[in-house]
Image (cartoon, helix red, strand yellow):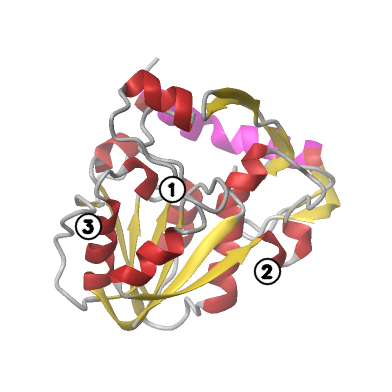
Amino acid sequence: MSMSLKRWLFRTFRPAIVAARTLWYAGRRYACPVCGGRFRRMRAFTGVYRLRGDLVDHFTPNAICPRCGAGLRQRLLFAVLAQRVDFTRPQSLLHFAPEETFFEFFSRQPALVYIPADLEPLRFLYPAALQADIRAVPLRTNSVDGLVCSHVLEHIVEDEQALAELCRVLKPGGYAAIAVPIYGATTYEDRTLDAAGRERMYGIDLHVRLNGLDMRHKLERAGFAVETLTLTDVPAQYFDLTARSAHVDSDRYVFFCTKR
């Protein structure tokens, strides 16, 4: 079954699925900043991936919103944006590889000129999205007020070229919320790896490196002032802060940037 068909089936039966999940998980312990739901617990994230050659269980309890499906990184990113950006103020927002929950929220904001963008928009069933290569964005210099780019750059070999492009299209003083999976302090990258080697070392063959917290230096070189934010910088009820896993470790950071 193709991914497009799976997405269509889920969207067709989504109201019934969401209603059942919301009722089953209903409670007050956790909150989702994206959809506003309250839950006694959240859905678990499951998966086993290789990192640097070792097989690592990424199982994480209370990781996924039962109502809207927002995972750790989506809830963190949304919470950071909600703290720092007033979406009732007229502005333009460029959003690369739009997550479904974010796409729906941003599309409903009357003051927002929303520009979803992807290299293959139809793959995500967003026919109105801008077709764009992040390494050569087809927008004017200093043309957008803000941008969101989450878990995209780990797929891009020329990530510094992409960051330079994101900075170029952003207006001076504009904001950029950028996230990549983070694995420790220092980035690991081996461009000699083939697909099997990338899967063995990076967990997914479509990833081209394991980013570290030194990612902020790339952002600074591109022209951004950078603030590194994590789970404890947003309201505690959005996350199970007792959960420990490789998934939590990799998805716990957002770089909130301002164009200098």
Q: Earlier in the sequence, mark 1 or mark 3?
A: 1
Q: Is residue 53 magenta?
A: no
* Image side of residue 207 versus residue 245, left or right: left
Q: In this orientation, which residue lies closer to the viewer: 226 or 151?
A: 226
Q: Is 78 situated above or below 187?
A: below
Disc ID at residue 151: 1
- Does dot 3 land on a helix, a strand or a loop? helix
Which x, y percent locates residue 228? 55, 67
Q: Which residue is at 28% across, 70% downward?
A: 167
Badges 1 and 3: C-beta atoms under 8 Å apart? no
Which x, y percent locates residue 14? 55, 35
Q: Amino acid at mark 2?
A: Asp
- Does dot 2 land on a helix, a strand or a loop? helix
Q: CA distance from mark 2 to mark 3?
A: 29 Å
Q: Amino acid at mark 1?
A: His
Q: Is 209 situated above or below 93?
A: above
According to the picture, the residue beneath numbered tag 3 turns out to be 161
Q: Which residue is at 22% across, 64% downward?
A: 165
Q: CA distance from mark 2 to mark 1?
A: 20 Å
Q: Is 250 situated above or below 87?
A: above
Report the magenta residues as a range. Answer: 5-24
Q: In this orientation, which residue lies closer to the viewer: 96 or 151?
A: 151
* Farthest-out residue, top: 1
Badges 2 and 1: C-beta atoms under 8 Å apart? no
Disc ID at residue 238: none
Q: CA distance from mark 1 to mark 3?
A: 16 Å
- Does dot 1 land on a helix, a strand or a loop? loop
Predominant SS along the magenta part: helix
Quarter of the image where the N terminus is located: top left
* Image side of residue 21 versus residue 242, left or right: left
Disc ID at residue 233: 2
